[in-house]
Amino acid sequence: MNYGYFDDPNREYVITNPRTPAKWINYIGTLQFGGFVDHTGGAIICKNDPTFNRITKYVQQMPSSDFKGETLYLRIHRAERSDSADEANYKVFSPFYVPTLDAYDKYECHVGLGYTRIISEMYGLRTQVTIFVPTGAAVEVRDIKVTNISDTPIEVDAIPVLEYTHPSALQQFTNADWIPQTMQSKMLKDGEYTVLVQYPFMHRDVRHNIFTSNLPASSFETDRKKFLGDNEYGTWANPLSLQNDELSNTEALRGDNIAALLQHLGTLQPGETKQLITQLSQESNYEAAKKSIEKYRNPKSIEDALDEMKKFWDTYLDVLQVETPDSAFNSTVNIHNPHQCHTTRQWSRYLSYYQLGLGARGIGMRDSSQDLLGTMANNPQDAKEFLKLLLSFQKTNGSALHQFNPLTLEGNEGDSLEREDRPHYYSDDHLWSILGITAYVKETGDTSFLNESIPYYEKDKNGYPLQASSVLDHAKRGLAFTRADIGKHGLPLLGFADWNDTVNLPTGAESLFTANLYGVALREFIALLKFIGQSTNEYETAYKEMQTRLEEHGWDGEWYVRYFDDKGEPLGSNKNKYGQIYLNGQSWAVLSGFASSDRAKRAMQSVYEKLNTKYGIKLSAPGFNGYDRNYGGVTTYPPGAKENGGIFLHPNPWAMMAETILGNGDRAYEYYSQINPAGKNDSIDLYEIEPYVYAQNILGDEHPQFGLGRNSWLSGTASWCYQAGTQWILGIRADYDGLLIDPCIPSKWDGFKATRKYRGVTYHITVTNPSHVCKGVAKVTVNGKQVEENLIRAEKGLSEVNVEVVMGS
Ligand code: GLC
């Protein structure tokens, strides 16, 4: 069964049945102002930070049928008024289906790029609500259009409602004494408009949440108790106050604050439409917000803002558009995957339906350094600025903090602090940014970035950084840290964990993943040094040194070991009862180039044989069966879930990349297709979550619910699947001296076309595959002239270049 369809020409996914197996969401705005909106109109909104400055109260764990954050009610005046208390004078319903759950004639939720548009038809009214944050603005706009599609006049009111949280989102749930005594709302009149202002008392003079609309409201409510009625034994499904002619005009002095406006739209004649625009923003006070509010009261500004947003996405997506024989591949690579990459770049792992944005998590070093690789081609300037921020959380010894809060800019060591008996750093965090630095220079050719001075994290007592150095030096210190931080086999110490957060072996354990990541970082760094004409000797030696150790100690016979514990015993070995083989141990040995050709092939074949399933490659097998403090987090999961033998999707694209390096385009594509969410659209009841974005995990075949997906949206899967699909399968990769075209595609493809914008030049690329190979370039023609290599260097002055590549041996 499906719950909707892909509308690629409009770059939307359209949900046609609101009873999806889990809430499906979309993001609006940015971390500076925005959040997500679910497919039934609920929304979580924050400004700059979801932990310390959250605006709407949205409780993910409540049932899907519940009110969450925001909604809209419509009420139809009954033709005949009744004086009987038992008979309602109004038919009240939500055009979003939730929370009133009325039967609908039509329901569509258009999940677009930067906006969600819900269209429904109920009781003779067609409602279209477009929810978005205009580009660069700090306001959530809801553009509501109500049309009478019946053949009789309908008198209708609209009641937009939202519920506030205390800005300290966690305290909202942990303190029911202080919080409710501080929450206050006021009503201001601005001419004919009603403006509802809300704040916790301590913010009264500095920061206000502001809710208003473009039409005069006849009454308002800010007290949830009054809105629901009967001492809150009224419900969101049937708020009793909506049976009164007007709301109570209460300015809440404490308690659970909401904002509700009663807007009489009047009597709509058949075919007539009324437009209501609501706005939620946060500024120091109404005066400060007024200019923006006046702007978006004007329907023309809404049209312009939607146009501007469309242009933003045109520019963003035009950087790479492809046409392959696989429509699910095209839809993912051209629209939804880059959209998800943009989203993960914004939100890291901070705020989603599964990442609650409460507490310390903030922006993750490891995660965000990988996320920005997925936006590098589309917006390198933004990626660079973000990378600079990340580098400022590196420590002077070269290691890095694990995460930081974007508002306070305070870093911390993450979950590693939970165990006193374990190291308080992660062995991989600082190495990922090196991939970002090199990717930026490859994309732009801008080497001046390498000389920019960036502070290290340690501060003096006045909060000033103790040291700063160039970007290049940050990378050098990162590499030096890992080179020195080694264990018994000369392999990098694990720290609290490496990429796999949940394997927390006793202090002294070594990580073969970090060894390989270090190898990748070294290779990248060596190429960069060559490009800028600096000596590479030291780094070549370091590379060989680690390669020798990995090859000497890491091979288990048919695959690579994943860890050595503090006693020097392997994990990820045939010898182990649980966790015999780990995916990343194999793919990364290929990516680093450490694995010899024979071992690389054997290791990846073991992945196929022991870890692959029809829904994706498992992270490891077999899963641990019971909590064991010695291994840590991984054993908290039942076998088949998440890191414990689940299909953890983030590493799947690494296996695709490794297969392309080995020239196996058929397998790389098989791995790509089996996890492409677009391909799951018609069997979604098993998978449950959004078919338009990648998930973080799918339950593996050791779990009875094999195939069930969870933790959609905020996952490194987005960035790496985009890289695997575009740079390794299609093989279009930015390099220091030009654009490399080195496809490794399924042999059945006749070829593909792509347009790539790179350093100001548009490359129109046609790849043909007459002899049906997976890899290999036989002939390259640039603007009609045959050239000797597949690294395309644009001639000066040209803005359009035609590249024809014929594959073959
Ligand atoms: C989560 C974390 C990420 C980690 C992964 C595997 O996705 O955000 O940092 O690498 O889990 O443990």
Image (tube, rainbow, N blue to C red):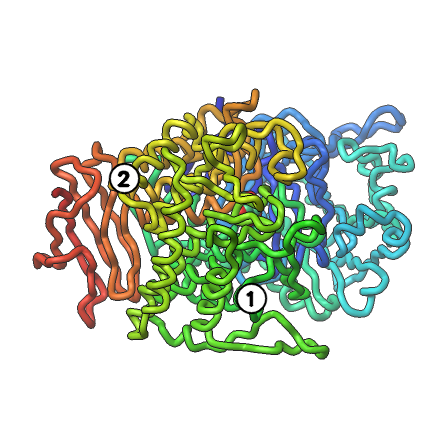
- Residue found at x 51% / y 41%: 111
- Residue found at x 49% / y 60%: 482
Label 2 vs label 1, nearer the camera:
2
Q: Amino acid at mark 1?
A: Gln
Which of the two residues, 190 or 366, is positioned nearer the viewer here? 366
Residue 508 lies, in percent from the top left, at: 58, 50
Q: How many marks?
A: 2
Circle nearer the N terminus (2, 1): 1
Residue 639 lies, in percent from the top left, at: 58, 27
Q: Mark 2, residues whose alpha carbon is within 10 Å: few (<14), some, or many (≥20)?
A: few
Measured in 3D between alpha carbons, the distance from the residue under mark 2 to the one under mark 1, in whole angstroms, is 37 Å
- Residue found at x 29% / y 43%: 660
The disc at residue 583 is: none
Q: Mark 1, residues whose alpha carbon is within 10 Å: few (<14), some, or many (≥20)?
A: many
Residue 439 lies, in percent from the top left, at: 38, 61
Q: Is residue 724 above or below residue 431?
A: above
Marks 2 and 1: CB-CB under 8 Å? no
**Residue 159 placement: quadrant:** top right
Residue 670 lies, in percent from the top left, at: 33, 32
Q: Is residue 390 above or below residue 668?
A: below
Secondary structure under badge 1? loop
Which of the two residues, 107 or 503, is positioned nearer the viewer here? 503
Q: Is residue 225 left or right of residue 237?
A: right
Which of the two residues, 423 or 295, is positioned nearer the viewer here? 423
- The verdict on label 1 being within 8 Å of ligand 1 is no
Q: Residue furthest left?
A: 785
Determine which residue is flagged by label 1: 394
Q: Is residue 520 left or right of residue 90?
A: left
Secondary structure under badge 2? helix
- Residue found at x 60% / y 31%: 22
Determine which residue is flagged by label 2: 598
Q: Amino acid at mark 2?
A: Asp
